[in-house]
Each structure stands twice: as C-alpha cells, then as structure tokens.
Image: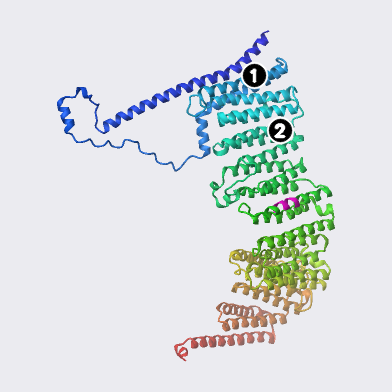
C-alpha cells in the first residue's frame, strides 16, 4: 500500500510541477503587463508637463474667475503665435541591423522561461508513459489512455488560454498557449509511439494513421497559435521516439513517422511563411535527423530511410513556394556564390538547396548498405529537378548535387558484377538523357549551356568511374566495354547534330558534344588497340578536330588539341612511356612517334592564321617537342644497337630531353599572355632538371674520373656515346635565349672536345686520368684551346659582343697558363718549342685583330666618318 501511495505521489508531482509553473508564468506575465502600462502612463504625463513648461504656459485660468483687466487684455492682445512642434524627433535608421542569429539569441534571452516550460510539460507526458512501463502500473491500455488524456488536457488548456486572452506578442499570455498545446502534441506523439513500440497495442497502419491525425491537429493548432507551438511539437516529436524506447524489431514505420513530422512543419510554414523560414528548416532537421539516427541504429531500415529522404526533399521543392509545380525565381545558388552576394538568393531557394543537399548526403552515406536504392533515389532527384522543376530557374544548379552523389555512390561501392556494371552505365545514360532533354527547353528559365555540359559529361563520367573503381573493362571485356563507349559516342554525336541544327551560328553546344565524342572514341579505341595505335589515334583525332573546326566553326574542338597534347606526351614519356619505346619493336615505336609528330603538325598548320591562339601554340609546342624526342630516341636506340648504352650516355640523353622540353616552353612563352608566367616557370624548371642531370654527367659519370660508374665509351671516334652525352645537350643549350645558357652550351662542347682528344690518343680503356697523358695529347689540348679561344674571341669582336670577347680572353688566358705551367714541365724537345711559338703567334695575331677592330669602330663612329 505504501509503495502504491509513493507512486501516486510521484505521478501527481510530475503533473503538478509543470501546471504550477504554467500558473506562475500567467500571473507573472499579467503583473508585468500591468506594470508596463503604468510606466507608460507615467511617462506620458511627464512628457506633457515638460512640454508645457518649455513653451512658457502655466495652468489655465477659468473664465469664471478672470477679472476685468484680464478680459480687456485678452481682447486687446494679438492672436497668440502657434505652439512649436512638440513631436519627438524621428529615430535615425539603424544601418546595422542584427542578423537572424542575433535576433534569435535576443528572443531566447527574453523568453527562455517559455522554452523551459514547454520542455517540462513535454517531458512530463513522455516520462509518464515511460515510468508506467518500467513500474508495471496499470494495464498498458490504461497507461496509454492516461497519456492521451494528459496530452489532450494540455491542448485544451492552451486553447482556453488562447481564446480567453490570446497568443499574440502584445497580450498578457504571450506564448503560453503555444507552450501548453505544443507539449500536448508531444505527449500525444509519445502515447501513440508507446502503444505501438512498447505495448504492441496497435498495428503499423493504425499507428501511421494516428500519427498523421496528430500531425493534422498540430497543423491546425499552429495556424492559430504561431511558430512556437510548431517548434515545440517538432523538437519534442523528434526526440520522443528515442526517449520512449521499446523492444519492437519492426521500427521501419518510424521513418514514416519522421516523414509525417517533417511534412507537418513544412505545410504550416508553406501557408504562414514566418521570417527566415526557420520553421521549415527545423522541420527538415527533425525529419532528416530523426530518420538518419534511426537508420544508423537499425541499418536494415535504410531503404525506408531513403523513402523518407525522397519524400521530404520533393515536398520541400513544392511547399517552399506553395505550388504543385516548383517555380523558384531569382538567382541560383551558384550565381550568388560567384557574385559573392548571398542576398540575391531567395529563402525558398535556400530551403530547397538545404533539402537537396541533405538528401544527396543521405544517398552517399547509404550507398554501401543499399547501393541500388541510393542509385534510384539519385535518379529520382535528377528527374525531379530536370522535368518536374523545369519552371524553377533558381533550382537548375542544384542538379549537380544528385549527379555528383550518383558518381560518389559508384566510387564508394565495392566491385559489382558484369550485369550490374551495365545497369549502372545505363542509369548514367538516363541521367545524361534527362539533362539533354532539359537543354532543349526554351525560355528564360533554362540555362542551356549548363544543361548541355551536364548531358555531355555525365555518361562518360559514369563510365570512367566504373573503369577506375570497378575495373569495368575486366568485368565486361575489352570489346564489350569498347562497344559501350562507342554507343555513348554515337549518342553524343547525335546531340551535336541536334544542337547544331537548333543553335545556328552559335557553335558552343555542338562543340561540347563533339569534343566529348572524340574523347570517348579515343577511350574506346584504347581498349582494343595496342599502345602505338592508341597514341596514334589521339594524334590523328587532334588533326581531325582541327580540320572540323576549320570547316564547321566548332571552336571548342580546339580543346581536344589542347588536352590531347599533354595526354600524348604522357603516353610517350610515362605510360607506356620511354622504357617501352626503348625495348619495343621498331615498327610500333615509329608508328607511335611518327603519328604524334604528323598529327599535331597538321593541327598546327590548320590552326595557323585563325583566332585559335591557344590551340596553335599547343600544337606547335607538341610537334616540336615530339620531333626532338624522336631524335633523342633514335640516338638512344642506335647506341643500344651498337652496345653503347653506358650510364653517361643514358643520363646525358635524359638531360637532353628535359633541356629540349624547357626550350620549347620558353620559345612559346610570349604567344599567350595569360600563360606566359606558367610557361616561363615550366621552361626554367625543365631546364633546371636537365642541368642537374648534366652536372651528374660531368662529375660522377665523367669517363675521366673512373669507368666504374660512367661505363666504357662506346662507338668510334667523334660519333660515339660522348657526343650524345655532352655535345647534344650543349647544342640544345645554344638554342636558349640569353648569353649564360649559350656559354654553358659552349662549355659542354669544350668538355666534349677534350674527351674526344682523350679518346683519340688513349682509346676507350685509357679514358681515366689515372692512366696518364702522352706529350702528343698535351700538345693537342693546347692547340684545341688556342683554336677555341681564338674563335670565341673573334666572334666577340665580329658580333661586337663584349661577353663573348671576354670569354675568348679567358680561354686564351687559360691556354697561356697551361703552356707555362703544364707544357713547360711535361713537354720536351720541339713539342715544347712549338707550344710556346704557337701561343706567341696566336696572342700576337689576336692583339693586332683587337686593335684593328677597335680602330675600325672608332673611325666609323667619328664625326668625319659620319659626315662622309
């Protein structure tokens, strides 16, 4: 008996505390209102008194007590001047209005007790059901009935307060009816959930019907009360299922409950349109959030979760503007972001964007558990935004979200079967077809280029994702996958024809489709042809693209040339790459490099003289680079064929490749102003890489130091591995602009000449310096230095280039030092005499030449010569 009494006391306390709080709030609000009215009256009287004193008027004297002199004075007096304006000055406009966050914080700071009261009442009803379940009080049906009565009583109390005093912000009972009725709605939700999931008193159909009924009641009450009731109902309704709990395994119906909960708030806000649309945002948060948490706890209900997500997203598109066919106007989200003006976007567009983004996030998260359901929902969203929302201009860019979600689902899913890969590719084709249909629509509400881009990219993007993540060519087979690619290319070609017929002189959309069709054809060929054929196909298609652009004015086809050039370079140097070109049979290598040179050379010729600067520069750069690569490859393969592939040769040729690529970039740096800095940076980076490799050749791999790392010199005199390792990169450096690069080229040529002399006198086996040097070899170095120094000196004088002249003087000074230091000690007999005589004669002759050239310059610049 004592235990039952204690339970009764607990229940009464749980009910009485919120009711008492409600009563106290009513009383405090009434007293606050009366005090505010009294203060307002007192302030009015104070202002009137101050005004009267300011204009100099005292208390009015009644006419009955006025004396004769007062009457005469009144009669003779002039009419009084009008009283000055006593209106208070208008307040200055507030140019810094607080945003919605500040207003929300201010409202909560002033009305937090209403929120606490609502939470107390709602939790009282929820805990009443939960406590009855835990303690076993009364039969289950009576417990549910008690909760229903409690919730109905709260709703009735709220209605009585609203009808008696109102629920507006200016009345004494402001927000109190919403607090009571909102808590009653939450209690009814909790009672119905307890009947279904705690006690199994009703089935899923009856549960859904009851939830819908309560939602309708909430909508009706929200219409009369205001947004606070809706907020209380949404938050409480979202939290109630997780507080009530239960042991039922059939929780899929709760997703329908969260859907109904979200729809209730959306429907009320669709009519009332409260500021900031915060009620709709709260509705979506309650619906999406509750369903997502439930799906995370019960993964077997993911399909029901996706149904809820789809229903809420589609409902938002319609209810955000209050129309069956969405017609959102204004700027798109992407336009506002690019313009950095968020005020361009209307609230309905922001709300729809939030819903679509949340739906796509749910699709991606659920892909691992329910891949096909996720793909279906993504397709439905694409179709809804493409067809159903075709009047909504502001929602067009939102279609990118489900398109991206579809690709993410494919990428995040494990490899499927052959049939599944084909079905996924078909779904991608459907998405592309929807975008193509939308691109054909006319009117101001359609962005045709954006839809055309989505139509041309979507199917190839799905195929590429399947290739990279599912290894689709292995699943379907090379021929089957190639045929699928050709079907996609055929569809793109058909689109190009349709757009060309519709757009007239505007070739943007046909060019988009043509470029993508070319790309897909090249990709399809890659699945069935060899490495050389694929490289050749890309190069030939670049030439064909330039030809079609010249014939039919399709400017975007130039981008196939622009993008095809680095792809071809990657195939020549990367995959299959340089290693394949060295070891493969000669015929496919010649085919690969030859078609690359011819294809981009033809493209360069076709694009010259037209307004295609970017394509012309890229085609010229590619063709020249491929010619240089082919020449280096020919030298390399020739050296390998004659057993000459030594380390210094390989490294020198690699350095030559980078030096050549750097020269090509620098040569065309000024052709496109926008790319000048990029090309200059790439040119010097490539040249720097080549310089590092040449530094290795000059030091570690130098045959003069040791043949352990450098390898034995291969080939006959002059035409050998030394020429490819030193003379070739030196000659390429002579092509560079600037004196420093050319002097470095001359220096490499001098190193090559010294190595050739060493090779001539000592042979391949005697290249290291440890083998010593003969007198004939030392004399040959002296003669070579004299010839080279004299030639450089003469070039400086003839070209009037002081830099070259100083370089020649430096070489001659080095020669003199060698003769006096090395030759004098190493040579004997006539060779020593000849060395000094040759040095003297050479220096004397060059001195005379220098004086003669200086006199000629001064004579040509004198006034007499100028007058003549």
Main SS of residues in magenta: helix
Residue shown at 64% from the left, 33% from the top: 264
- Report which residue position mark 2 lands on: 256
Secondary structure under badge 2?
A: helix
In this rendering, position of residue 579 left or right of residue 785: right
The magenta span reads 429-435
Q: In the image shown, does 21 or 828 lie closer to the viewer?
A: 21
Instruction: List the single residue furthest toward the bottom.
Output: 868
| 290 over 121 or under it: above or below | below
Tell me, yes or no, whether the highlighted magenta stretch contains residue 432.
Answer: yes
In the image, residue 110 lies at what x, y percent?
49, 29
Residue shown at 56% from the left, 45% from the top: 346
- Report which residue position mark 1 lands on: 149
Counting residues from the N terminus, which is met first, the one under dot 2 or under dot 1? Answer: 1
In the image, residue 327 lies at what x, y percent?
62, 46
Question: Quarter-wise, where is residue 348 in the image?
Answer: top right
In the image, residue 228 lies at what x, y percent?
56, 30
Question: Quarter-wise, where is residue 551 in the image?
Answer: bottom right
């Amino acid at each position: 008996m004592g235990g039952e009494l204690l339970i009764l006391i607990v229940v009464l306390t749980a009910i009485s505390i919120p009711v008492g709080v409600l009563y106290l709030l009513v009383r405090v609000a009434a007293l606050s209102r009366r005090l505010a009215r009294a203060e307002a009256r007192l302030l009015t009287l104070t202002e009137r008194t101050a005004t009267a004193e300011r204009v100099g008027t005292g208390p009015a004297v009644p006419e009955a007590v006025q004396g004769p002199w007062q009457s005469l004075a009144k009669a003779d007096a002039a009419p009084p001047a009008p009283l000055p304006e006593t209106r208070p000055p208008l307040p200055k406009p507030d140019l810094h209005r607080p945003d919605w966050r500040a207003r929300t914080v201010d409202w909560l700071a002033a009305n937090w007790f209403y929120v606490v009261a609502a939470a107390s009442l709602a939790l009282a009803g929820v805990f009443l059901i939960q406590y009855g379940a835990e303690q076993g009080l009364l039969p289950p049906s009576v417990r549910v009935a008690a909760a229903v009565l409690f919730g109905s009583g709260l709703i009735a109390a709220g209605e009585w307060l609203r009808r008696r005093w109102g629920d507006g912000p200016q009345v004494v009972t402001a927000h109190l009816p919403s607090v009571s009725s909102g808590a009653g709605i939450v209690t009814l939700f909790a009672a119905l959930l307890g009947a279904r999931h705690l006690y199994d008193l009703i089935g899923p159909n009856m549960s859904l019907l009851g939830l819908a009924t309560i939602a309708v009641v909430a909508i009706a009450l929200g219409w009369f009360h205001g947004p606070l009731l809706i907020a209380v109902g949404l938050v409480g309704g979202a939290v109630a299922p997780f507080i009530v709990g239960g042991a039922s395994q059939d929780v899929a119906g709760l997703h329908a409950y969260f859907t109904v909960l979200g729809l209730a708030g959306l429907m009320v806000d669709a009519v009332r349109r409260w500021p900031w649309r915060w009620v709709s945002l709260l509705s979506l948060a309650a619906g999406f959030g509750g369903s997502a948490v439930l799906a995370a706890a019960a993964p077997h209900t993911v399909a029901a979760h996706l149904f809820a997500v789809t229903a809420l997203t589609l409902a938002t598109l319609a209810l955000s503007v209050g129309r069956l066919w969405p017609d959102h106007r204004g700027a798109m989200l992407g336009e506002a972001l690019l313009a950095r003006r968020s005020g361009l976007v209307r609230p309905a567009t922001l709300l729809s964007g939030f819903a679509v983004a949340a739906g796509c996030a749910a699709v991606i998260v659920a892909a691992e558990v329910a891949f096909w359901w996720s793909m279906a929902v993504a397709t439905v969203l694409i179709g809804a935004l493409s067809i159903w929302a075709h009047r909504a201009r502001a929602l067009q860019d939102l279609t990118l979200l489900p398109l991206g979600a579809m690709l993410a689902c494919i990428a995040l899913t494990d490899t499927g079967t052959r049939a599944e890969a084909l079905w996924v590719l078909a779904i991608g084709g459907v998405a592309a077809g929807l975008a193509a249909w939308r691109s054909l629509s006319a009117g101001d509400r359609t962005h045709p280029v954006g839809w055309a881009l989505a139509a041309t990219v979507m199917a190839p993007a799905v195929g590429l994702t399947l290739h990279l993540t599912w290894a689709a060519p292995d699943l379907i087979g090379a021929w089957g996958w190639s045929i699928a690619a050709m079907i996609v290319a055929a569809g793109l070609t058909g689109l190009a024809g349709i757009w060309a017929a519709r757009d007239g002189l505007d070739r943007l959309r046909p060019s988009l489709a043509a470029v993508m069709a070319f790309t897909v054809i090249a990709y399809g060929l890659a699945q069935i042809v060899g490495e050389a054929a694929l490289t050749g196909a890309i190069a030939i298609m670049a030439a064909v693209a330039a030809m079609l652009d010249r014939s039919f004015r399709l400017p975007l086809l130039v981008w196939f040339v622009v993008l095809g050039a680095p792809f071809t370079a990657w195939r020549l140097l990367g995959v299959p790459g340089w290693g394949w070109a060295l070891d493969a049979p000669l015929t496919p290598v010649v085919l690969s490099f030859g078609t690359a040179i011819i294809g981009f050379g033809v493209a360069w010729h076709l694009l010259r003289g037209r307004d295609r600067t970017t394509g012309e520069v890229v085609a010229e750069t590619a063709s020249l680079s491929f010619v240089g690569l082919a020449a280096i490859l020919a030298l390399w393969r020739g050296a390998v064929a004659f057993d000459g592939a030594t380390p210094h040769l390989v490294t020198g040729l690699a350095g030559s490749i980078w030096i050549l690529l750097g020269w090509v970039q620098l040569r065309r740096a000024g052709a496109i102003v926008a790319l000048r800095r990029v090309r200059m940076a790439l040119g010097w980076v490539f040249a720097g890489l080549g310089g590092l490799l040449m530094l290795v050749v000059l030091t570690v791999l130098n045959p003069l130091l040791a043949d352990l790392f450098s390898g034995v010199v291969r080939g006959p005199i002059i035409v050998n591995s030394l020429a490819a390792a030193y003379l070739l990169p030196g000659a390429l450096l002579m092509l560079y602009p600037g004196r420093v690069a050319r002097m470095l080229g001359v220096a490499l040529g001098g190193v090559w000449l010294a190595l050739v002399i060493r090779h001539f006198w000592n042979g391949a086996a005697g290249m290291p310096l440890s083998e010593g040097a003969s007198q004939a070899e030392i004399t040959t170095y002296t003669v070579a230095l004299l010839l080279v120094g004299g030639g450089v000196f003469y070039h400086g004088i003839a070209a009037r280039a002081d830099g070259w002249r100083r370089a020649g003087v430096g070489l001659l000074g080095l020669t003199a030092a060698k003769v006096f230091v090395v030759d004098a000690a190493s040579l004997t007999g006539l060779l020593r005499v000849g060395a000094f005589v040759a040095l003297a004669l050479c220096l004397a002759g060059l001195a005379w030449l220098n004086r003669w050239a200086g006199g000629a310059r001064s004579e040509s610049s004198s006034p007499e010569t100028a007058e003549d």
